[in-house]
Image: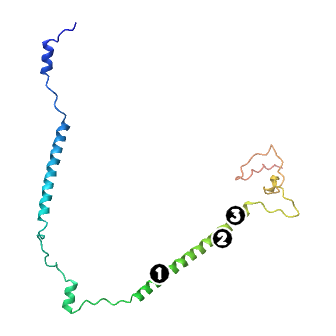
Amino acid sequence: MATAPSSSTRSRRRARPAPPPPPWRRWLVFGLLFGLGYGFTQRLVDLRWQEDSSRPPAFRMKAPSGGVSLEELRRRHGDKGKTLPADLERLARDQREAREKQEAAKREEAARLEDAQRAEKERVESERRRLDAFDSPPEPTAAEPARRDDPLMLTPPTPELPPPEPFNAQREFTPPDQPPAEATPSQP
């Protein structure tokens, strides 16, 4: 059988205060109220401006700023606004001639550069052929057949040397920078 809760546990439950609401809820309510107030104010201002739009603007054009305008100079000197004389055909012809000169200079420079590159390429090729001639073995003549397996073909011939002196064990060794010691003269 279940027992009824004691009065002490009931009082503990009632004595505990409710937790405060999270702080973000306050800021959410504040933001919503602020946005609502801003929207109403904006709408009222827009309605008022629409009522006042029939009136002319509250400002007038002031006198021109310092300096002399072109119209003022024309009035002062009696000019009635003539256009500037210009020969458009001559200007177009001059521009076309200048453009043709630039294009001709570009073509000439390109041809000069191409010739220089071709000459450099030929020089490099001839230098490569000259160096390859040193690396390759000489071409065989008709009298002697080519033998590529002969190792002596690639090595220079050995020089002819004089025969060595016979070894004398009694002779003392002298370094090459000192003259040989002379034997003691025999007494007669």
Q: Secondary structure at mark 1?
A: helix
Q: CA distance from mark 2 to mark 3?
A: 14 Å
- Report the residue at 62% width, 72% height from top: 118
Question: Which numbered mark, 2 or 3, is in the foreground of this view?
Answer: 2
Alpha-carbon span between mark 2 and mark 1? 34 Å
Crowdedness near tag 1: few (<14), some (14–19) or many (≥20) residues, C-alpha within 10 Å: few
Residue bearing the label numbered 2: 122
Is 153 drawn above or below residue 2 in the view shown? below
Which picture quadrant has residue 12?
A: top left
- Sooner in the amino-acid sequence: mark 2 or mark 3: 2
Closer to us: 99 or 131: 99
Q: Secondary structure at mark 3?
A: helix
**Reading the chain from its start, which is encountered first: label 3 or label 1?**
1
Q: Which residue is mark 3?
A: 131
Instruction: Judge whether 15 appears above or below 177 on screen.
Output: above
Name the one closer to the observer, 172 or 109.
109
Point 21% across, 92% down: residue = 77
Figure quadrant of residue 84: bottom left
Residue at (65% x, 67% y) in the render = 124
| Residue 114 x/y as whole percent | 59, 73
Amino acid type, callout 3 = Leu
Residue type at mark 1? Arg
Q: Which residue is mark 1?
A: 99
Q: Which residue is situated farthest in the bottom direction here?
A: 78
- Residues at circles 3 and 1 in contact by the CB criterion of under 8 Å: no
